[in-house]
């Protein structure tokens, strides 16, 4: 295999430059909350493959389920020769996602593919075309989902033109806008009604907690207000739960925190313990509105990925990973709040469960975004340079950290939900040193 330096030389000669990596080490094996590279160095994993390995890497039930399925068959295409595990995954999703109504699901490969299909379903079911999304949103890298995504660099720069009938409105961002949830919703709804027209909107698509945009938790009341407007207007409320789903926020899905019942939910990432799988789940009458053959794909709901998903969901239940996410927050948040008190460049600690973040700012500088008449929030000017320096120092200490945010100034924490308190403590010690 060689060491990381040798592999990196091979990578430079073989892999397209546009495919980036955060660190130059190469992983040999991983388990629970740690990764070990080919040079024998151990890393504390606060990334979980971007909220994918919620049950931990090489989770025993997932490994065994995958092994059994590989021995039986690897692929038939569900649209050609179907199999029971696809049906079983859909049954689980229908039961687990928010909403006490009859549901249907369809399986795909990636989060972006799930979002694209949710838009297809919404447009087909409503007969409308317009899709409303929000500032700071991230929904994927395909042509349609790049149009849905807010951040230009690196996701959209030079890749246009993009799909049409996409409209963007302000997101509730309490740290920066100073608005209550209902007031922020009224601002967004006013823009939709004036600039799009309520009767033109097929779907309002939103992450209940924004991921790449900066782990932004909307002010209480924002999501219910937007959902209520969508229902009254005949538009579908679509929750992108790709990063928030599968116990990550202390509930199975983040929409539950405010009692929101989406018409459609998109899932991926944490669904299958690291294997590629995604889904759209929603009201039966909406999902079934699409004609036969209108949904699908060669690899969608691959039997190996389905086996992994069923084992992952079983593991989440057996290990009580919703409670584990809340435990992780109970360990991390007080420590992060203490660090924020000691370091004035930490503008805010936010998040839910094991989806936490700190926003790094220039101390004492005004925010350019504060709503008119609401004054300047101290310390809110983004500081991406310091954020990158903290991340670099953490990596040098063996702590794998991700950044995010429209301004590149948010450090996010996404530990596997099976990480123990001792490893969490070591991660927080390394973070403190990096700060």
Image (tube, rainbow, N blue to C red):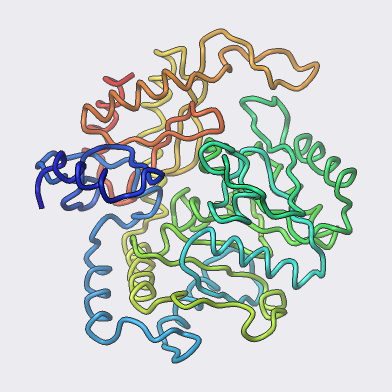
Name the foreground residue: 139 vs 354.
Answer: 139
- Residue at 31 percent across and 60 percent down: it is 319
- Residue at 43 percent across and 15 percent down: it is 341
Extreme top residue here?
A: 364
- Residue 174 percent coordinates (x, y): 64, 29
Q: Tell me if residue 33 comes above or below residue 277 in the rendering.
A: above
- Residue 33 percent coordinates (x, y): 25, 46
Image quarter (top left, top right, bottom left or bottom right) of the C terminus: top left
In the image: residue 123, left or right of residue 246: right
Name the foreground residue: 340 vs 133.
Answer: 133
Which quadrant would residue 266 be assigned to in this image?
A: bottom right
Q: Tell me if residue 352 comes above or below residue 417 in the rendering.
A: above
Name the foreground residue: 38 vs 358.
Answer: 38
Extreme front residue here?
A: 13
Extreme bottom residue here?
A: 81
- Residue at 50 percent across and 51 percent down: it is 244
- Residue at 34 percent across and 55 percent down: it is 53
In the image: residue 392, left or right of residue 177: left
What is the count of numbered marks?
0
Name the foreground residue: 1 vs 306.
Answer: 1
- Residue 351 percent coordinates (x, y): 50, 37
Which quadrant would residue 343 be assigned to in this image?
A: top left
- Residue 153 percent coordinates (x, y): 54, 36
């Amino acid at each position: 295999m060689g060491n990381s330096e040798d592999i990196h030389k091979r990578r430079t000669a073989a892999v397209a430059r546009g495919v980036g990596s955060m660190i130059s080490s190469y992983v040999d094996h991983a388990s629970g909350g740690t990764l070990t590279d080919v040079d024998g160095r151990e890393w504390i994993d606060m990334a979980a493959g971007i909220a994918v390995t919620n049950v931990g890497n090489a989770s025993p039930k997932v490994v065994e389920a995958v092994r059994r399925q590989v021995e039986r068959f690897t692929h038939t295409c569900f649209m050609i020769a179907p199999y029971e595990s696809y049906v079983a995954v859909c049954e689980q999703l229908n039961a687990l996602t928010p909403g006490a109504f009859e549901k249907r699901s369809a399986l795909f490969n990636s989060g972006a593919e799930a979002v694209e299909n949710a838009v297809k379903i919404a447009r087909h079911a409503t007969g409308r075309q317009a899709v409303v999304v929000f500032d700071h949103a991230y929904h994927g890298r395909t042509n349609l989902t790049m149009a849905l995504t807010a951040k230009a660099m690196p996701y959209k720069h030079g890749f246009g033109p993009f799909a049409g009938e996409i409209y963007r409105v302000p997101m509730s961002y309490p740290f920066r806008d100073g608005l209550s949830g209902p007031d922020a919703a009224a601002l967004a709804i006013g823009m939709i009604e004036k600039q799009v027209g309520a009767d033109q909107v097929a779907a309002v698509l939103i992450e209940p907690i924004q991921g790449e945009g900066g782990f932004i938790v909307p002010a209480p009341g924002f999501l219910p207000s937007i959902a209520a407007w969508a229902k009254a207007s005949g538009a579908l409320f679509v929750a992108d739960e790709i990063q928030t789903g599968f116990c990550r926020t202390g509930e199975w899905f983040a929409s539950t925190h405010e009692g929101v019942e989406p018409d459609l939910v998109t899932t991926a990432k944490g669904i299958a313990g690291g294997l590629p799988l995604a889904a759209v789940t929603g009201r039966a009458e909406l999902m079934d509105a699409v004609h036969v053959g209108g949904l699908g794909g060669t690899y969608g709901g691959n039997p190996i990925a389905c086996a992994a998903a069923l084992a992952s969901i079983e593991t989440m239940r057996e290990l009580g990973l919703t409670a584990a996410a809340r435990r992780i927050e109970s360990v991390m948040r007080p420590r992060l709040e203490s660090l924020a008190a000691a370091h004035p460049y930490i503008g805010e600690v936010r998040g839910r469960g094991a989806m936490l973040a700190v926003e790094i700012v220039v101390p004492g500088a005004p925010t350019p975004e504060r709503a008119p008449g609401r004054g300047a929030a101290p310390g809110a000017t983004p500081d991406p340079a310091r954020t990158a320096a903290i991340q670099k120092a953490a990596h040098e200490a063996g702590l794998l950290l991700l950044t995010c945010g429209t301004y590149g100034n948010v450090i996010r924490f996404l530990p596997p939900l099976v990480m123990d308190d001792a490893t969490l403590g070591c991660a927080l010690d390394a973070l403190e040193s990096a700060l």
